[in-house]
């Protein structure tokens, strides 16, 4: 049985999906972010938590 998942060494698999293999790639956690971005994230999380937990608590209390 042959291994059909292996690709030849000279096969450029990155070009198949549009990746540029010559430049340095970064991921989101490695990207810089500002204090404003952190503040917006915290506010969004707090509003989401208030909606997710506040509405059921108010509904049970009524």
Image (cartoon, grey):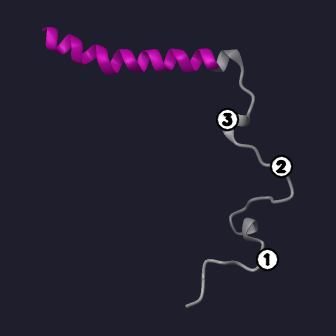
The residues tagged by marks 1 and 2 sit, at their Cα atoms, a distance apart of: 20 Å
Residue at x-position 70% and y-position 42%: 27
The residues tagged by marks 3 and 1 sit, at their Cα atoms, a distance apart of: 30 Å
Magenta residues (range)? 38-62
| Residue sitting at the far right | 22
Q: Between disc 1 and disc 2, whose residue precedes?
A: 1
Q: Tell me the SS state at disc 3.
A: helix
The majority secondary structure of the magenta stretch comes to helix
Q: Which residue was labeled with disc 3? A: 29
Toward the viewer: 58 or 3? 3
Q: Tell me the SS state at disc 2.
A: loop
Residue 46: x %, y % from top left: 45, 15
Residue 32: x %, y % from top left: 75, 28
Which numbered circle lies on residue 9? Answer: 1
Question: Where's the N terminus, which quadrant?
Answer: bottom right
Residue 29: x %, y % from top left: 67, 35
Q: Which residue was labeled with disc 2? A: 24
Residue 12: x %, y % from top left: 78, 72
Instruction: Tell me the quarter of the picture where residue 36 sits.
Output: top right
Horizontally, is 23 left or right of 61 in the view? Answer: right
Q: Tell me the SS state at disc 1.
A: loop
Which of label 1 and label 2 is nearer to you? 1
Membership of 30 in magenta stretch: no
Q: Between disc 2 and disc 3, whose residue precedes?
A: 2
Which numbered circle lies on residue 21? Answer: none
Name above or below for residue 3 compared with residue 15.
below
Name above or below for residue 21 compared with residue 8.
above
**Circles 3, 1 touching at the beta carbon (< 8 Å):** no
């Amino acid at each position: 049985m042959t291994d059909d998942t292996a690709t030849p060494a000279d096969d450029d698999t990155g070009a198949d999906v549009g990746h540029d293999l010559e430049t340095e790639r970064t991921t989101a956690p490695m990207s810089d972010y500002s204090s404003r971005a952190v503040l917006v994230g915290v506010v969004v999380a707090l509003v989401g938590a208030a909606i997710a937990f506040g509405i059921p608590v108010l509904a049970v209390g009524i």
